[in-house]
Amino acid sequence: MKNNVILNSDSYKYSQYNQYPDKTDYVYSYIESRGGLYDKTVYFGLQAFLKEYLADPITQADIDEAETIITAHGLPFYREGWEYILEKHEGRLPVAIMGADEGTIIPTRNVLVTIMNTDPKCWWLTSFLETALLRAIWYPTTVASNSYRSKEIILDSLERTGDPSTIDFKLHDFGARGVSSQESAGIGGAAHLINFMGTDTVEALRYIMAYYNTDEVVGFSIPAMEHSTVMSWGRENEEESFRNMLKHYGREGSMLACVSDSYDIYAACEMWGTTLKKEVEESGATVVIRPDSGDPADVVTKCVKILDKHFGSVKNDKGYKVLNTVRVIQGDGIDHQSIRSILYSLNVAGYSADNIAFGQGGALLQQVNRDTLKFAMKCS
């Protein structure tokens, strides 16, 4: 469906062109987070919106389409105003939109974006664009802020128990299937990549390359199993499914992730540490074991202890144990509270945060809304 910015608004906006006082020339508005779940925001999203939705001028066909739909919808349509923009400005919207540098950490209750019409005959245009502009800011900024809070929690644990330089790959985006659209995956996934470099949301890579002036791929992933690729072998051949994974992807310096709770996560950890141990060690790869059910803090800690029993560990200079050869990723039920619980449980048991990574899906990209950070655009 072709973009038509004239139809990218709320219904009530179409009746507001004659609601301002006579001799109104300019309307200046701003977007802010008025508080909410976090005390700061990671601002993101404006550049992509401007390129995708406002860079192309409106056309006569856009005006005709909008008038047909809006009048049938039961509202007045300001054809004179839109045709003025077409004729006077060659279809380009006469507004000045300014924002902070994207990726900046900004305390809540501060202006993030401003917008003002630049032609006094288009006083009505500022507020008309609220719907699209606010949506373009609140979603990616909220996802980036959500991701950043997780980063703070994990980094705090790494600074106390492990290696903070590993933070970039400690929270992996599993959210592509859990959002409402491919566009949401791109926008939200790109917002997460402000804070981390691990993602399975391929659309986020394309989104950044398309809108943020780079040919570089800025997010990374590793080969990984899912339950279907394990269970297709049958329970009696679970070990062979793991061995097959090692055969194809176990290389010196590589990493591979193996979901291991298809039948019995603890039995699988024993298997990794006994009958598969030699092959794991000889491969030169780091095998990342993925439990995916049960109480996250309890299950992760038990898995780490079993793996430690077989693969051993070394104490780092902070006095916490780091597993040899293997790691664990928890990708189910991850939110800020469960991240804290898992890290606390590991630390109490004497294990470094180096041993664990997290995968997060819907809670990262979808379980947010405009009220999470109380976003609004207001006339000033």
Image (cartoon, rainbow, N blue to C red):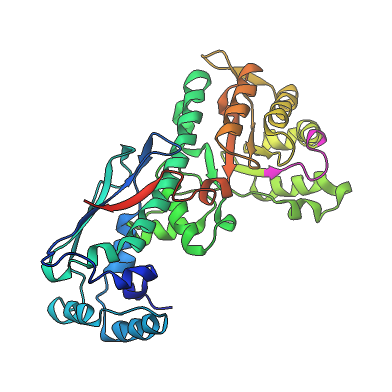
Q: Where is residue 79 in the image (x, y as percent from the top left)?
A: 25, 82
Out of 139 and 209, give the one closest to the viewer.
139
Q: Position of residue 15 (x, y in %)?
A: 30, 72
Out of 370 and 47, give the one closest to the viewer.
370
Magenta span has 261?
yes
Q: Could you tell me which residue is drawn at 63 percent across and 42 percent down? A: 331
Q: In this view, does 292 lie above or below 9?
A: above
Q: In this view, does 187 lie above or below 264?
A: below
Q: Position of residue 186 (x, y in %)?
A: 46, 58
Viewer can see residue 160: yes
Viewport quadrant of the N terminus: bottom left
Q: Give the range drawn in magenta.
A: 258-267
How many marks the image carries: the answer is: 0
Q: Is residue 239 left or right of residue 221?
A: right
Viewer can see residue 193: no
Q: Could you tell me which residue is drawn at 86 percent across and 52 percent down? A: 234
Q: Is residue 110 above or below residue 204?
A: above
Q: Could you tell me which residue is drawn at 48 percent across and 59 percent down? A: 184
> Which residue of the protein is positioned furthest toward the right in this rendering?
236
**Residue 78 lies in what quarter of the image?**
bottom left
Q: Position of residue 315 (x, y in %)?
A: 59, 16
Q: In this view, does 248 lie above or below 13?
A: above
Q: Could you tell me which residue is drawn at 46 percent across and 53 percent down? A: 188
Magenta span has 297?
no
